[in-house]
Image (cartoon, helix red, strand yellow):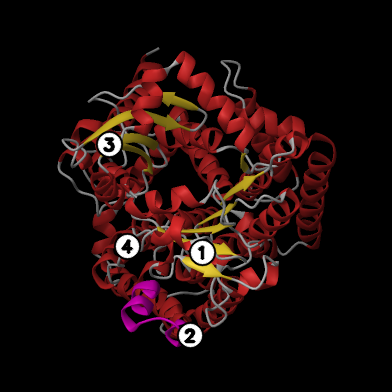
Amino acid sequence: MDHGSSSLMSLMIVVIVAFLIPIVLHHFKIRALPVVVAEIIAGLALGHSGFNLITEDSWLELLSLFGFIYLMFLSGLEIDFQAFTKKSGGKNNAPKPLTVSLLLFAGILALSYVLSLGLVQMHLAEDPYLMTIIIATISLGVVVPVLKEKKLLDTELGQTLLLVTVISDFVTMILLAVYTSIQSHSLSRMLLLLLFFVVVAVIYLLIKRFAVPNMIRLFNQGTTVQLGMRAAFALMLLFVVMSEGLGVENILGAFLAGAIVSLLGPSKTFVHQLDSFGYGFLIPIFFVMIGVRMELWSLLSDWKTLLFIPVLLGFIFLSKMLPVLLLSRWYARSQVLGSGLLLSSTLSLVIAAASIALELGLIDDSIYGSLILVAVISCVVFPVLFNKVFPKLERKPTTIGIVGANHTTLPIVNDLKQHGYDVRLYTASRPREEEDKPLLTGDTLQLVASLDTQVLDEEGLFESDIVVLGTAEDATNISLAHEALSRGRERIVVRAEDPAKYERLHHEGFTVFSTLHASRTLLRALIEQPSMVKLFTHDNDSTGEIVLGNGSYDHVLLRDLPMLQNVLILRIYRSDSYLIPHGNTNLLMGDKLLVSGRPEHIVQLRAELE
């Protein structure tokens, strides 16, 4: 009984510390320090290197192991496989993100091996292959939030950096599994690893062939039964147990389970639920226990370790910076340097590789601790340097390409321009000047030879952030909509007057409108909710939607937003539900704010939050 109380006491301390860390970071506005790094530092203070308040036991060992497995599951879940299939909507002279990212990773991997041989020659490491994997890895969990905060994900450079990171995360995980199998010096274990990949592929194909609709419904439904969560955990543990049964590292099973869930296209709400469970409970225990187990003072007393840490950090940076110089063909020097710094961030996979190597006896405790310290330092120092070096991008207005000049599209052009949008109206016939003279100024009106896909492509329609297809011909709109979707455009608005086509486009995921449906909806609203219609059509004030994309306002209370004296927050849409806003509402990345106010004030708030 006393032993159980002691175990729960240690667990309680770890959980309370994990609860307090983000509160402290937010209170003191320490945004440069990742939460997971703060958790490792807290573990150092609580463990063998500090006050020695934590007693390692079966409870903490099990939860820490499960946290590690779940972290690898979320790493696989973070991979956006759609990024590999998106066609670039950029200009012809812009680099192709997928092609460039493959070249960059090939250079990173080759250079990592050369630098690993250098570590062996310096007698700082013994196995060049293990060090190659460690040097080549990039932290997806660090790179993605930084790119989001800098609003780079929608740019060619941001897509390239994201793809390099995804490829690195996936390939180095596979290489780590192959490496550990080779180290066993057993042909049967290699064959079992191959068998494991075959079984995983078969399971994925079976799910995709027979269970995709049901699985997607499971992953996207939000009832109290939470079948989606149960299905995800069942799949993860199935792969973990299967991998252990075949002599493969369990983290590979968890990683591939997460990748399969990602391939099934779960909703953002479901992914958020999985993240919340992991980063709210299991994963903090894992990171705190890393710090608890480290013997920091013995590491710092060893001259070899003190030399190994800065050398390895320098090699990690060189392995990314030299290949990234390829980007100097298209981007400024400061952008290239910043890219090399950001890609030098590493964390989870280094910890995974170090843990496995320690378990197999390939490295000793001092090297293990050194690798953890390098991972911690890299994901603190390099993102901070990236923010210092990378130039602040001038915010460009959202571009809207509208096809078809008629009574439906013409009236909204000037309204959109007043709201700060860059509007292009594509038409094959000039509108009557006496009625639409304001449209003939500047380059708003784009006269084209025809509304053919090739012609509109040459005129830049598919480079628009939002594509609106509003001609009177449903067939033309539908054809252009599918072409825009194939070009990677995510926001496509399609006009369809035929009810059957309207429903079909709606089920395909497009935003659809028709004049008949709009008139019916407006008339019903005028009858049932005239005050609401008045709010949306008031001459002085207008409404707008703002998507929270600035990481600085993630988990910030609504009352702390700037410029609230000039706008009114009407509603907050979060995934498939909405919130009634109040001062204590905690904002999250991706929230859609429905706001009302003067157009210029909405534009200012949008520039700050998006």
Mark number displayed over residue 165: 1
| Label pair 4/3, CB-CB below 8 angstroms | no
Which residue occupies 61% across, 25% down?
Answer: 221
The amino acid beneath tag 2 is Leu
User: Disc 4 and disc 3: Cα gap in Å?
Assistant: 24 Å
The label nearer to you, 4 versus 1, is 4
Q: Which residue is mark 3?
A: 541
Quadrant for the N terminus in the image: top left
Q: Earlier in the sequence, mark 4 or mark 1?
A: 1
Determine whether the residue tagged by mark 4 lies in a helix, strand or loop: loop
Residue 426: percent from left, percent from top: 56, 63
* Magenta stretch: dominant secondary structure: helix
The amino acid beneath tag 4 is Arg
For residue 381, which quarter of the picture? bottom left
Does residue 256 appear in the picture of this structure? yes
Q: Earlier in the sequence, mark 2 or mark 1?
A: 1
Residue 97: percent from left, percent from top: 56, 72
